[in-house]
Amino acid sequence: MRAAALAVLLAACGAATPAPAARISSVPVYAADATATDLAALAAGRPLVIDFFASWCEACRDNLAPMNALAGEHAAGDILVIGVAVGEDRAVADRYAAREGIRYPVYTDPEMRFEDSLGTSALPLVLVVDESGHIAHRSPRLDAQALEVIRRLPARTARAR
């Protein structure tokens, strides 16, 4: 009986935890020039790989080399590879990107609204978003499983902007 009561109590406490979103949201992140950017619109029908990180997150550094390599493989824009610095302002994100050698575009989410809209708060985080905006894969690493999901996505030709 006590175990059942404890289970009900624990379930009630956890009710506020949002479920992970199935689609990328239109909550803006900020480009290097401080322009509010809707990542779904930016992708414009192309797959998107997003690396969420923070300068203080030691585990996030493990994704930087594989993300740089992925960005190099898709430099033509068939798949967009970007980073989102979570909870940090532009100056911190820029210093971190320069120090760590990040070669893909970095956006900021200083108030963590975009991250919150996805129903997630853990770092590191890599999202693979398909061409229709659905989140096809989420994991803490750009690992073999994430790369397999990316490989299966139909790449789109970069459009003139």
Image: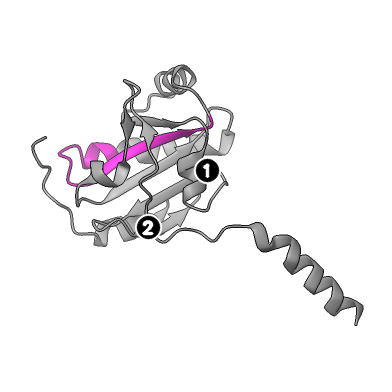
The reply, left or right, for residue 93 in relation to residue 74 is: right
- Would you say residue 142 is visible in this rendering? no
Mark 2 surroundings: few (<14), some (14-19) or many (≥20) residues within 10 A = some
Check the image and name the residue furthest to the right: 2
Q: Nearer the viewer, residue 141 or 135?
A: 135
Label 1: which secondary element: loop
Q: Is residue 78 magenta?
A: yes
Label 2: which secondary element: loop
Return the mark for residue 124. Answer: 1
The residue at which mark 2 appears reads as: 23
Residue occupying image coordinates x 47% and y 51%: 118
Q: Is residue 50 magenta?
A: no
The reply, left or right, for residue 149 in relation to residue 51 is: left
Q: Position of residue 37 (x, y in %)?
A: 31, 35
N-terminal label among 2 and 1: 2
Residue occupying image coordinates x 18% and y 41%: 77
Q: Is residue 137 above or below residue 35?
A: below
- Provide the residue span drawn in magenta: 71-87
Q: Residue flagged by tag 2: what amino acid is it?
A: Arg
